[in-house]
Image: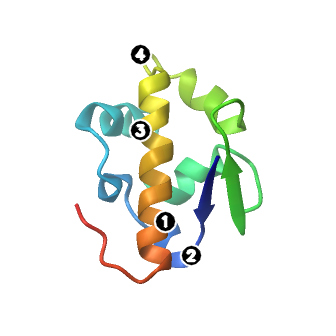
Amino acid sequence: MHVIKITDEFLGMHIAELGMPVRVLNQLEGEGVNTVLELLYCCGRSMSCLECDKKGCAIDVKLMAIDNFGKKHLSLVFEALHRVSEEVYNGKAVQQ
């Protein structure tokens, strides 16, 4: 399970700052997802703390509906969200 720590700084980040592959970025941007807030909004959950496991989260369904967006892409999104949220929460500079 990934626990994503939410801060205002994190929510305002462009998804390109998450360090995901270009193909994943292009697919998300093609669906109108440009910021972390827009990505997390797909879940329709409380923004204070978001917990997603790979077995079933509302974001899975929305992202998996994108053409050619597979389980590997979904895994990359969760890993990037978790890693960068930890870096922002702990006050570390985000590495791009």
Q: Are marks 2 and 1 in contact (CB under 8 Å)?
A: yes
* Mark 2 or mark 3, earlier in chain: 2
The extreme top residue here reads 68
Task: In the rendered view, tell whether residue 51 sits above or below residue 10.
Answer: above
Question: In this view of the protein, can residue 33 be seen by the observer?
Answer: no
- The percent position of residue 44, horizontal first and vertical second, equals 74, 48
User: Do callouts 4 and 2 mark residues in contact (Cβ within 8 Å)?
Assistant: no
Q: Give SS at disc 1.
A: helix
What mark, if any, has residue 7 been given in the picture?
2
Q: Earlier in the sequence, mark 3 or mark 4?
A: 4
For residue 85, which numbered disc appears in the image? 1
Q: Residue at x 54, y 48 (%)?
A: 39
The amino acid at mark 2 is Thr
Q: Judge depth for marks 3 and 4 and give the one in front.
A: 3
Residue located 64% across and 43% down the image: 42
Q: Amino acid at mark 1?
A: Ser
Q: Earlier in the sequence, mark 1 or mark 3?
A: 3
Q: Which residue type does callout 3 highlight?
A: Leu
65 vs 83: above or below: above
